[in-house]
Every structure is written in structure tokens, then in C-alpha cells.
Image (cartoon, rainbow, N blue to C red):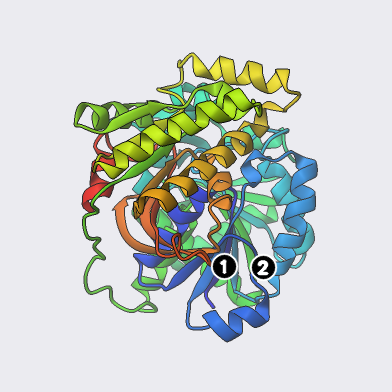
Amino acid sequence: MRICFYGDDFTGSTDVLEALATGGLRMILFMDMPDVSTWQETFSQYDGFGVAGVSRTMSPEEMEITLHPALTALKAFQAPIVHYKICSTFDSSPLTGSIGKVIDIGRRVFPKQRFTPLLAGSPALKRYTVFGNHFAGKGTEMLRLDRHPNMMLHPVTPMREADLRVHLAEQTSCTIGLMSVLDLEHHGTMLRERLDEKLNQASDVLLFDVLTDDHLTKIGELFAEESKHEPIFVIGSSGVEYALVSHWQQRGALPAVSEQRRAEPADRLLVLSSSCSPATCAQIEWAMAHGYAGIRVPAPLFFAEDSEAKSAQALLLSEAERLLQSGKNVILYTALGPNDESIPETQHLMRLNGHNLAGSGERIGGRLGEMASALVQSTGVRRVVLAGGDTSGFAVKRMNMYALEMIAPVVPGGPLCRAFSQDEWMDGLEIVLKGGQVGPPDFFDRVLRGLS
């Protein structure tokens, strides 16, 4: 086994799956933690695995209860590298999805390693870290996270500071050092000496800048070298996998990838979106302008349990079923962009019903998962997109899948996967879990047609 990982959300977990699979590794993503004996008996031919979690929406107390046993279980598989996958936009706060809390737990579970590596950048996703400040792409622009409209206005974890060391200092008391772009210009022995110098400054955590693919390859080399002495626990985006794959490929430690995986076109597509991002809004609007049927799911439907709400949901599903049966591609969506009136309405209903705002993902995702299951079973649709990083994990958990394996890439961060399920009508379902920022305006049509 080369690597195992735990994802803080489901869309990010498939992002890691893609980075490893396209690099030539055979990987599988589980919905729950497998036990060692099951792995050895059934999945030992794989190069590693991931577990898709939902810790990005958790409080520090919930993370302690969930992540300490999860990371302890991963450690038992004795992979040289254990990766806790975070969003490449560093979504976190002291109260929700705290990366600092993960650092604290990881240091207890892996007490022998010299430091905790932290890597957020991923050039494949247009995410860059320079002198500790993090940037994300918006169209052709590169914006600091605290000036990026999607991150500034995130409904749960708005980003107010682009220097990740400052942002993280609110979540942990650990000292945070930096391996900067200038440090990464060194090579070989000098690069390793530079790393040692940084660690001699008593850094508990070392943040790695990333600007170029060459930087990633060098970071992958450092991680691989570090793991030779003791299994290491790494926190970061899918940049961790891109770094390792690049290093392994350069060393000839991976089989050559002869051709890119491809997917066949589907006859119909079902999309369920709870994303508030402008990117997803543009995708929904593009699709509806090109013949897709759009059905808005009203906010009260996620909170009311009375007969009137159940009747409204039945009518909505009946209309979606009718459209799918007639051969239409259908999108069920909760919002169009960050300024949609449904967002404050949802927040009001959450408070009214005594729920924490961070729990909106579970409430909305769970209900969308129920809708997806019902429509897959009643219409036989075989390709589905779930859009929304905070909600897709809860949706998948309601769809009774136990694992995913990548079929083919579509765009970086949004691969097409095949589901494993005990339910005959769900087993083999082709599914994309799409984060809010992922994909161009015609993304849904690319998924439908199997285009990369």
C-alpha cells in the first residue's frame, strides 16, 4: 500500500481519487472505514484507499469524536503516507471544520514524526500559495482568498485572511513555519538541508508554498523521503497526491499510463445541486439555456415534515420523474449563486428549527440524497451529478453506496465514478461529486457526453 487518505468532504475525496488514478494507481474510495482483514481479503490488489468523510462541517468536539478513531484506524494499515484531505480553498474556522483541530489530533495519533506537513496549493485546480498567502482562480484572474467573492461570501466559513499561517493560528497553538517558493528553488541535498533549517526553528507545522509543477515534484520528494523513516501524517489538498505522483513518475516508480480513461455518453443526466457558488450558477443557467429542465427545490421543503411538505415533495419528484421518463436531462437546484434569496431564507429556517447553520449541509444533503435515490430507482437514470461540497457527502450517505472507483476524468476535481452498492438498482450508478468552484459553464453537458 502506498497511501491512504481521509477526506473532509466527498467532493474533495473524489478529487484525490482522480489525482491518484490518473497517475496510474488503482484506488478505491469507501464511505466508511474498512477493517484490515476485509481489505486484505478483498481489496489487497489496490494500491491504497480513501475514506470519504464530512468533517468539514463539524465542530471541534465532533471532530475529536470522529477523527481520532478514524486516523487511528488508518494508521493500522501501515501505509507510509496517511493524508487528511482538506479543501484547496482552506475552508475552515475555529468553530467549523477546524484544520487546527485536525493538526492537534494528528500529532497525538502520529507522535513520532518530526513535523506536520501542510500543503494547500494545487496548480491543476488553479490554487497557489506564495509566501504563505493563498490564491484561487476566478476565470482568468488569480485572487487572494480574502478577496475572492466565493470565499469571502461562503455561507459557513467565509475567508477573511489570505495568509494561511494567520488564518490557522486562530485554530491551533502549534507553531507554523513556511517552506517558501524561494526555499523550493533549491535542489537535492540543499533542498533537504533547507527543510532541516526550517525544522530547527521549532516549527510544529510546516506550510509549503506552491507556484509551479516543479515545486510540487520537489515537495513530493520531501514527503516520500520523510516517510521512509516513519509513516507520516500529511494535511492538505489534492496537491499532496499530485506532488507524490509527480515524484513517483519521475523516479519510474509508477507504471506508464498508456492512454487516458474515457467514458461513454449517457442517455440522460440527473443533477442535484445545493451549491451557492457563481460557478455552479453559471453551469445551471448554461444547461437550462441548452434544453435541460430546471426545477427549484424550495427551502421549506428541507425543514417541514408535515403532510403539506410531503405532498409538495411528491409533486416535485413526480414532475422530475415525468421529465426524465420523457428523455429530458433534469436539474434539481436549491439556489442560483451566492445572492440567491433562498440562502437567508434557509438560514432563518435553520435558526427557527433550532439548528446550527453549519448543519445545513446535513439537512439539505440528506434530503437531496433521498430524492436522488427515489429518481434513480423509478426512472432507471444511470448518470448523476451531485453539486455542493458541504452537502454531497450527506446525499451519498442516503444513497446506500459503500464505495466509489473512478471511471474517467471530466475536469480536474470532478471525475466520473462508479458506485458500489448492495442495492441492485444503485450498483454501478455513474456519479460525479462536484465542488462549487469546479468546472466550466458547460460542465453538466461534458458529464452527459463523457467528455474530458
**Where on the picture, by quarter, is residue 337?**
top left
The picture places residue 400, in percent across and down from the top left corner, at 56, 57
Does residue 158 appear in the picture of this structure?
A: no
Between 92 and 400, the one nearer to me in the picture: 400
Count of all numbered marks drawn on residues in the image: 2
Between 111 and 34, the one nearer to me in the picture: 34
Report the side of 91 relative to 94 (left or right): left
Q: CA distance from mark 1 to mark 2?
A: 7 Å
- Amino acid residing under circle 1: Cys
Circle 1 crowding by C-alpha within 10 Å: few under 14, some 14–19, many from 20: many
The picture places residue 218, in percent across and down from the top left corner, at 43, 61
Q: Which residue in the structure is indicated by mark 2?
A: 74
Whether residue 13 is situated above or below residue 289 in the rendered picture: below
The picture places residue 387, in percent across and down from the top left corner, at 43, 39
Between 146 and 260, the one nearer to me in the picture: 260
Q: Which residue in the structure is indicated by mark 1?
A: 4
Secondary element type, mark 2: helix
Residue contact between numbered discs 1 and 2, judged by CB atoms under 8 Å:
yes
Q: Residue at x 74, y 66 (%)?
A: 72
Does residue 427 appear in the picture of this structure?
A: yes
Circle 2 crowding by C-alpha within 10 Å: few under 14, some 14–19, many from 20: many
- Amino acid residing under circle 2: Leu
Classify the position of the N terminus by image quarter.
bottom right
Whether residue 163 is situated above or below residue 336 in the rendered picture: below
Q: Residue at x 54, y 22 (%)?
A: 299
**Where on the picture, by quarter, is residue 137?**
top left
